[in-house]
Image (tube, rainbow, N blue to C red):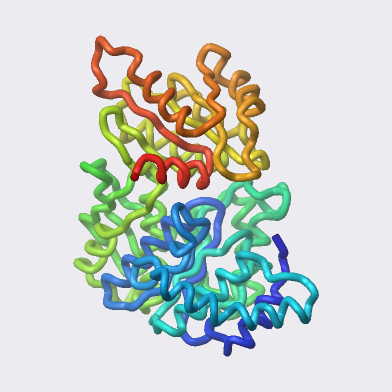
Amino acid sequence: MVFELDRIEELLDLLGSPQRAYPSIHLTGTNGKTSTARMIDSLLRAHGVRTGRYTSPHLETVRERISIEGEPIDERRFVEVYREVRPLAELVDAKTGEQLTYFDMTTAMAFAAFADAPVDVAVVEVGLGGAEDSTNVLHAQTCVITPIGLDHTEWLGDTLTDIATAKSGIIHEGATLILALQDEEAAAPILERCLEVGATVAREGSQFGVVHRDLAVGGQLLTLQGLGGIYEDVFLPLHGAHQAQNAAVALAAVEAFLGAGTARTLDGENVRAGFAGTTSPGRLERVRNAPTILLDAAHNPHGMAATVTALEEEFAFRRLVAVVAMLADKDVSGALDLLEPVVDAVVVTRNSSPRAMPPAQLAELAVEVFGEDRVHVEPELPDAIEAAVNLAEEDVDAGISGVGVIITGSVITVADARKLLRR
């Protein structure tokens, strides 16, 4: 990872500054960025706006990072864009003596693909942080900050103040910021940045938010307070209060971008259609029944807390077993502490990342939280999934109704499991 903008700026200059060919909505935060970006994308398309969406990391193919009109760029076009960008990237590499990063390249390719499409707006998620992220060449006039927690502390700092300061760097002069509810420690530097650059801020809990939510089959039914008014009977096919919060943030962002506010609201039918069409793979995603198998990409305590709350509120598992594989640089113990009360057993394993914590080391941490009897070790993910299913179905006399498996700990864990289970 290289935190500087000089090389990506030079590459984009050589490409003709494609990121200036369309307005953008720029998102950062610790958790919820991808889900919120996908909701914004769906809402905009429901209003007849042609969209490009750039998110990371991907689950199954790098093409997912670059979506146009809600669909990943096709293989042929991906190769064409790469061939357009590569020779100019090589010029920049030769000039600086260092290679552009993988993320630099996918960012430049996304911006070029969006300009060529062309799109009416790009919905762009930061890769890491904000101020020095490759996407921060946008200077977007509509930006979003989702809830901030402790993550990537080795790069962003080990306090909420440090992390929020880094993320607030996406707020540029005259922008409108849609700000999710934050701890006071995180909110302070963000609001200071808004004052510094003359940005307008709309805050969850003040100008917008979730008025009411009811559980529904396959998701939840929401009443949302937007910048322009109340939107009722909004079905969101995703689970968890955190997804309802993401929906409120997404709605406010689209209202701000399309010019809705106190003077006018968005069309309610379009809003309902946009949310109803939202998907967020790997976020409490059900991929199997009998027993139920859920995939969830929670990879830090902040995200795991939201997942656990959703499991407690919206699922009625009689027996639940977790498959966990995490990266070694994460707060593994913190995540396991939160998971422990809602699962009966845990199977620790590893994912395909070279940064994955070895199963034996993960098991040691898990035993401290769960106790030795509830921890099982399987070095390979396919075996871990099989073991978890067997453990979930141990109480055969009661049948398999109400038993389940949740596979969690990392986006990479979910991606690996998704490939195995969705074949």
Left or right of 420 on screen, residue 230: left
Residue in the picture at 60% in, 51% down: 184
Give the camera-side residue of 313 and 128: 128
The residue lying furthest to the top in this view is: 397
Q: Is residue 312 visible?
A: yes
- Which residue occupies 28% across, 72% down? 265
* Residue 197 vertical placement versus 224 (above, below): below
Query: In the image, residue 163 lies at what x, y percent?
Result: 66, 55
Residue 109 vs residue 184, the one in the foreground: 109
Say which quadrant the N terminus sits in: bottom right
Residue with the most extreme right position: 97
Residue 190: quadrant of the picture: bottom right
Q: Is residue 20 left or right of residue 213?
A: right
Q: Which x, y percent locates residue 421?
A: 36, 40
What residue is drawn where x is 32% and y is 41%?
287
Quadrant hosting residue 175: bottom right
Residue 396 left/right relative to 164 = left
Residue 373 against residue 317 in the figure, above or below: above
Percent across and percent down for residue 106 are 56, 69
Q: How many labels does the image show?
A: 0
Residue 192 seen from this side: no
* Front residue of 75 and 348: 75
The quadrant holding residue 334 is top right
Q: Where is residue 302 in the image (x, y as percent from the top left)?
A: 54, 42
Q: Quadrant of the C terminus?
A: top left
Q: Which residue is pictured at 32% across the width and 20% down the height? A: 318
